[in-house]
């Protein structure tokens, strides 16, 4: 869609196909392209602006138009019908108006004319689409096109490079075991016997490769560039013995200079320490900046619990990704994007308990129906839909065991995706609890969870309630990845719940959708200590946000392991 051969492709598609498909994780598939809008909306962490939605809607409209045009080729009809449709599509994309420095469009037009004459001789009333593709492929065999521009790059293996004549040679992969390579050991004839009989022997192989190497590096009109990798993970490589380090030369200029290459070379020449140029995480004193900070983090602002947790992990990463909304673009792979998979799994569990409690014995059937409902909301393609089903089927025994244990303890799911907003200790918090399980108190009649505002729960130092007759609840947060034992999510959720509900939070937990187990909190400390410690930390973090402090100081050094912003950070330098 971005090819110069099709100048008629709409500009919005040409400009944004690569970036949007990369962001949506599209590798291939018509359905993936037809649902790119829904995929991006569902996988976006923040709500898209009206302008972004308008661009996305127009992009989806043009993509749908292109695919609809291509789908006409699959309609039932004769060969002549399909040829005319093909010409219509190519004309619509302005293929035949391609610039004159190539003769490819003229050659294709000639082949289509020959194809049409062939149809006059062989023209069944109806022809299947696979037959049309077969005939057209046969016609395209031997198609050649030439450009007036002959410059280019050719990548060839070492063995096939003998007859090349090139201006510049880049020879990579020069490691000991590959150059020279060695033939397999002959268990029958010793090397001396082979040499005496005139048969190819080890020394012959090594000398032949060395002569080929020496001839090859002298075929370019300029000095060749020779490269050898130092390591692959933990495996260390040794350079080829054919490399003569005494004859190595440093190039006068970078081979393919980029801004980064030039900056690195300038820095090396000046021998400066550029760490001072890196941002220390403090915003400058400016009225506009102060106004933005007050709007985002001021006394009237509500803080998402997940944002506070993200700031705790690394303030600078929070500033880049959550405040500025910048993320490193990744090359799409044939896998479901982790954020989309998390939303799909959360939606499946929500649909499972949407109507209330489900008996553990009936979870199997209900879970698959819940997954089917979620897959309609999150288009991931047929293959990944099957993978998701297999994952949940493998998880099913652990889920049934965990749910049975929860029921034996007297708790039953009563609410899912519960949104909360509360002011706790001068902190205005908001968040969403994935699931709430409820247990009726001993002295209360049957009922449901209440929602009375401004009600505090009394607890002793061990976290047990002063009134054990009250209803109890457990707060659960689903996790598709690893859990963070230092996370502030659970204690802040509990604090918000306590602020507006009568039911006592017995405990809270991370419900892993990897192994089907619940990791309950608090561990050793009582509930009151668990909550107070988290609130003190949260207040300190919020105060730093309000001051505009986004220092590159991660909570744990391991946070830097998979961070894509290391070039901007000196926190670990």
Image (tube, rainbow, N blue to C red):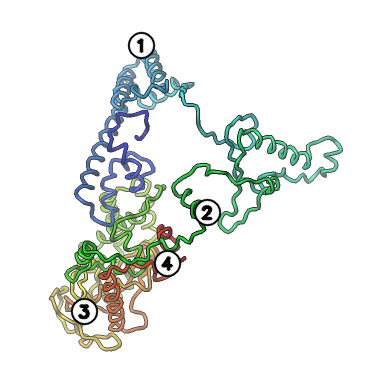
Look at the numbered discs 3 and 2 and tell me whether their residues touch, using CB distance below 8 Å. Answer: no
Whichever of callouts 3 and 1 sits on the residue coming sooner in the sequence is 1
Q: What is the C-alpha distance between the residues marked 2 and 4?
A: 25 Å
Badge 2 is on which residue? 269
Q: CA distance from mark 3 to mark 1?
A: 85 Å
Q: Identify the residue at horizontal 58%, vertical 32% (top origin).
A: 167
Query: Disc 3 designates what residue?
Result: 425
Mark 4 → mark 1, Cα distance in angstroms = 74 Å
- Rate crowding at label 2 as few (under 14), some (14 to 19) or many (20 or more) other CA atoms within 10 Å: few
Any mark on residue 571, and which?
A: 4
In terms of sequence position, does the residue under pointer 3 or pointer 4 come before the other? 3
- How crowded pointer 4 is (Cα within 10 Å; few <14, some 14-19, many 20+) is rated as some
Q: Residue at x 14, y 74 (%)?
A: 450
Residue 400 can be seen, yes or no: no
First in sequence: mark 2 vs mark 4: 2
In the displayed structure, 332 sits above or below 124; it is below
**Residue under pointer 1:** 120
Q: Quadrant of residue 163?
A: top right
SS at badge 3 = loop
- Disc 3/disc 4 C-alpha distance (Å): 31 Å
């Amino acid at each position: 869609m971005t090819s110069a051969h099709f100048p008629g492709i709409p500009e919005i598609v040409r400009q944004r196909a690569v970036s949007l498909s990369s962001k949506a994780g599209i590798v291939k598939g018509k359905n993936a392209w037809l649902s790119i809008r829904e995929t991006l909306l569902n996988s976006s962490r923040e709500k898209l602006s009206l302008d972004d939605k308008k661009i996305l809607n127009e992009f989806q409209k043009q993509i749908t138009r292109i695919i609809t045009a291509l789908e006409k080729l699959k309609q039932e009809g004769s060969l002549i019908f399909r040829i005319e449709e093909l010409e219509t599509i190519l004309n619509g994309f302005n293929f035949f108006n391609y610039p004159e420095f190539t003769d490819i469009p003229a050659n294709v037009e000639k082949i289509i004319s020959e194809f049409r004459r062939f149809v006059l001789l062989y023209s069944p009333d109806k022809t299947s689409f696979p037959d049309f593709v077969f005939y057209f492929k046969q016609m395209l065999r031997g198609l050649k096109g030439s450009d007036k521009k002959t410059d280019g790059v050719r990548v060839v293996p070492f063995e096939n490079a003998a007859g090349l004549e090139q201006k510049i040679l880049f020879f990579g992969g020069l490691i000991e075991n590959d150059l020279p390579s060695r033939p397999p050991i002959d268990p029958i004839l010793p090397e001396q016997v082979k040499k005496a009989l005139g048969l190819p022997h080890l020394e012959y192989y090594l000398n032949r490769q060395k002569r080929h190497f020496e001839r090859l590096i002298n075929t370019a009109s300029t000095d060749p560039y020779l490269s050898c990798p130092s390591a692959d993970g933990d495996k260390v490589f040794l350079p080829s013995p054919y490399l003569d380090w005494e004859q190595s030369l440093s190039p006068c200029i970078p081979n393919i200079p980029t801004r980064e290459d030039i900056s690195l070379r300038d820095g090396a020449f000046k021998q400066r320490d550029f760490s001072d140029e890196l941002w220390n995480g403090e915003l400058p004193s400016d009225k506009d900046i102060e106004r933005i900070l007050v709007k985002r983090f001021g006394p009237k602002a509500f803080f998402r619990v997940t944002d506070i947790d993200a700031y705790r992990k690394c303030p600078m990463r929070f500033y880049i990704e959550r405040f500025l909304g910048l993320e490193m673009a990744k090359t799409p792979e044939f896998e479901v994007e982790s954020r989309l998979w998390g939303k799909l799994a959360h939606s499946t569990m929500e649909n499972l308990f949407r109507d209330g409690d489900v008996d553990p014995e009936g979870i199997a059937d209900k879970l698959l129906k819940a997954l089917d409902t979620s897959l309609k909301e999150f288009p991931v393609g047929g293959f990944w839909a099957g993978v998701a089903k297999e994952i949940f089927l493998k998880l099913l025994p652990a889920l049934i065991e965990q749910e049975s244990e929860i029921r034996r303890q007297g708790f039953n799911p009563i609410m899912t995706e519960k949104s909360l907003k509360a002011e706790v200790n001068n902190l205005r918090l908001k968040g969403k609890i994935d699931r709430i399980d409820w247990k009726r108190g001993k002295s209360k009649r049957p009922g449901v969870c209440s929602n009375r505002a401004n009600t505090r729960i009394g607890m002793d130092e061990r976290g047990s309630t002063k009134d054990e007759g009250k209803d109890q609840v457990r707060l659960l947060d689903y996790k598709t990845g690893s859990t963070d034992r230092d996370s502030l999510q659970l204690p802040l959720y509990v604090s918000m719940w306590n602020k507006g509900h009568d039911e006592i939070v017995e405990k809270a937990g991370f419900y892993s959708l990897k192994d089907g187990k619940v990791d309950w909190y608090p561990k050793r400390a009582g509930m009151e200590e668990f909550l107070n410690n988290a609130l003190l930390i949260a207040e300190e973090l919020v105060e730093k946000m309000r001051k505009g402090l986004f220092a590159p100081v991660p909570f744990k050094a391991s946070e830097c392991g998979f961070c894509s912003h290391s070039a901007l950070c000196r926190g670990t330098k």
